[in-house]
Each structure stands twice: as structure tokens, then as C-alpha cells.
Image: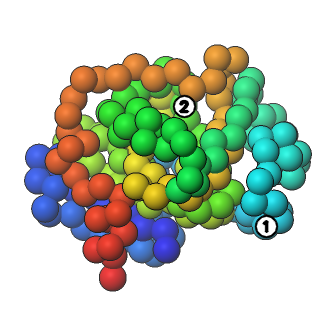
Amino acid sequence: MTALTIYPDNQPQFGELYTDFTAIRSMLDPIGVQFAHWTASCPLAADADQASILAAYADSIEKLKQQYGFQSVDVIKLNPDHPDKDVFRQKFLAEHIHGDFEVRFFVEGRGLFYLHVENKVYAILCEQGDLISVPANTRHWFDMGEMPKFTCIRLFTTPEGWVADFTGSDIAKLFPIFDQYVADLP
């Protein structure tokens, strides 16, 4: 289930949960986050590599490239047996910003984006078919859980791709991690 919880940034125990897609979109729109649900129906082999995933979604990727002027695209795919899953998780868990707006399309699995905007934290549980764009310079972090299982197509307006500027804040440690967040959903 796709979900959104909005917390005061200094009171992670007081979140308000939304699970209706229209409500989620209406809560994210004022902070400049585009949120959509696409069809993620291209069958992929368990060992599908980046090239085959990009080929399967080539038409959708091309439409996004034309619409937003994306210059680079890649795939991040993590499973529970990935040897570097802990390294990736720790990197993404640190609050950071990008000079580029960040677009992710969840082809398989799920992950949890946290956006820190003004005095609120928006926790967005994205699942297969969800497309999210995070505005440039928005403080955020991402949690994939201890046993990640997701495939995301990432699109960038810069040729360099994913480049993060870490804020040095430890705010991410105050909020529920992926596994706790998912376990607490109704």
C-alpha cells in the first residue's frame, strides 16, 4: 500500500497517515512534489540487468526525457542478498539535497522517502508503479529497509546523475526506519 505520513519535524511520534492516493497527491502538491501512479507491468527476469530494464520501459522513459529534458537515466536494483545493501542503505539514509530534481519510478518492490520541508517531515512509502519527483534542493533521505527488495528507474536533468550534498543533520535517526514504518501500518 502506498502511504504518506506527515510529521512535525521535531515530534516524530505525532504523524498523520494518509493512504488514499488522491489525498496523498493533494498533500504533496503544495510542496512541489509530483506523485503519480503508472503501470509497472513489463515482466522482468529475476536477474534482469540495467539494460534490459531500461529497454522494457524505453517508451515511458523517452516520454519523461522529452517532458523534462532528462539527460541521464539509470536503474538501482537491490535485493536482500546484494553484497553492498548495507553500504547503499547508509548512504541513502543520510539527509541530503540535490541541485537537480529527483525522479524515481518504482518498477518493483518498495521504499520509503522522507522529505524535510520547512518544519515538517513527509514520509512517503512508494510501491510498484509509483512515480515520485522530489524538487531540487529539498532535504530528504531514503530507506529501503534491512532486507531491500526494489527496482527503481532514476532520471536526472544533469549528465552526472545522482550527486548528493549531505546536510550533516542527524534528523533521519529520529524517525521510524522502513521496517518499523511498514510494521505500524494498519
Visible residue check, residue 148: yes
Instruction: Name the residue at 36% across, 47% down.
Output: 114
Label 2 Cα neighbours within 10 Å, binned few <14 / some 14-19 / many ≥20: some
Instruction: Name the residue at 63% across, 42% down.
Output: 76
Q: Quadrant of the C terminus?
A: bottom left
Which coloring applies here? rainbow
Residue placed under numbered mark 2 in the picture: 101
Q: Is residue 110 left or right of residue 77?
A: left
Q: Quadrant of residue 155?
A: top right
Q: Earlier in the sequence, mark 1 or mark 2?
A: 1
Visible residue check, residue 27: no
Q: Which mark is residue 134?
A: none
Front residue of 83 and 142: 83
Residue placed under numbered mark 1 in the picture: 41
Tag 2 secondary structure: loop
Q: Is residue 17 left or right of residue 26?
A: left
Label 1 Cα neighbours within 10 Å, binned few <14 / some 14-19 / many ≥20: few
Taking 137 as reference, is 82 above or below it?
below
Q: Quadrant of residue 118?
A: top left
Q: Position of residue 103 (x, y in %)?
A: 60, 40
